[in-house]
Image (cartoon, helix red, strand yellow):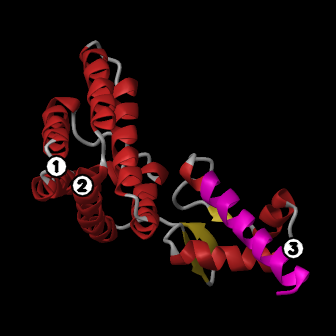
Amino acid sequence: MSNQATNGSFLEKKVYEDIRMMITNGELKPGDKIIQDQMANRLGVSRTPLRRAFSELERDYYLEITAQGVFVNQFSTEFLTSIWEVRAVLEGLACRLSAERMDDATVLYLRTLFANAYPKFEEGNYDPYHKADRIFHTTLLEEAKNPVLKRNIENTQVLSIALDLGILRSPEETYQEHMDILDAIEVKDSERAEKLMLEHIRKTTPLLAEKADK
């Protein structure tokens, strides 16, 4: 491969990641129009790697490209529901694999996170529980040790970040669900762990439309 082709591929990946980060950190919000020349100038690239990155971002559901321009994707209720259905199955599989591979120290670490965060929620501070929830799902994904699964789950998780969905269900509802999942993982009951995670994610589905429309 020529140096020019290698540099082009590197630039495309960098532009992809830069714009993806702008979406996931909320700098670019659903419905925002991206002006190509302005974005190219900001990132210090030509239009060619920018357009290629746009195509990849559209494929991964971050952007919508129309005759009117390039926009950060706005997700319909139907699309969100379909994504959540896929996420439930994928995270269920991640949980099954984690039950086979996670060590006791990691289980204890996750239990401790929630045990420390829940009292703070009861005092009115949601942030520690939100962080514990995020670490819980990220750790399960890492412990599954499956890079293909990881990539696909990350593409569904980004929607909750981009839309700032946050915690859709109260910790009062989800705390025991998290503990039950960790119980199953601790005793290596992979089938039960998968089932509980499926139920955990699916209980969120009816709340997606209400939250996303706000």
Q: Please tell me which of labels 1 and 3 falls first in the chain.
A: 3
Residue at 87% over, 73% down: 46
**Mark 1–mark 3 distance (CA, rounded to whole Å):** 52 Å
User: Answer yes or no: do the residues labelled 2 and 3 have beta carbons within 8 Å?
Assistant: no
**Mark 2–mark 3 distance (CA, rounded to whole Å):** 47 Å
Q: Give the extent of the magenta segment.
A: 1-22
Instruction: Tell me which corner region of the image, top left, top right, bottom left or bottom right, holds residue 107.
Output: top left
Q: Please tell me which of labels 2 and 1 falls first in the chain.
A: 2
Give the x, y percent position of residue 138. Answer: 40, 47
What amino acid is found at the position of numbered circle 1 in the picture?
Answer: Lys
User: Along the horizontal axis of the image, is 2 left or right of 154?
Assistant: right
Q: Secondary structure at mark 1?
A: loop
User: Along the horizontal axis of the image, is 203 left or right of 147?
Assistant: left
User: Along the horizontal axis of the image, is 178 left or right of 157?
Assistant: left
Q: Mark 2, mark 3: which one is toward the viewer?
A: 2
What amino acid is found at the position of numbered circle 2 in the picture?
Answer: Glu
Residue at 24% over, 16% down: 122
User: Answer yes or no: do the residues labelled 2 and 1 have beta carbons within 8 Å?
Assistant: yes
Residue named by callout 2: 100
**Is residue 137 or residue 98 the one in the foreground?**
98
User: Answer yes or no: do the residues labelled 1 and 3 have beta carbons within 8 Å?
Assistant: no
Instruction: Tell me which corner region of the image, top left, top right, bottom left or bottom right, holds residue 9.
Output: bottom right
Give the main secondary structure, helix, strand or loop, of the magenta stretch.
helix
Question: Is residue 162 depicted above or below 152 in this figure?
Answer: above
Residue named by callout 1: 188
Residue named by callout 3: 46
Instruction: Tell me which corner region of the image, top left, top right, bottom left or bottom right, holds residue 168.
Output: top left
Give the x, y percent position of residue 202. Answer: 18, 57
Q: Using a 10 Å C-alpha cutoff, classify the residue at mark 3 as few (fewer than 14 neighbours), some (14 to 19) or many (20 or more).
A: some
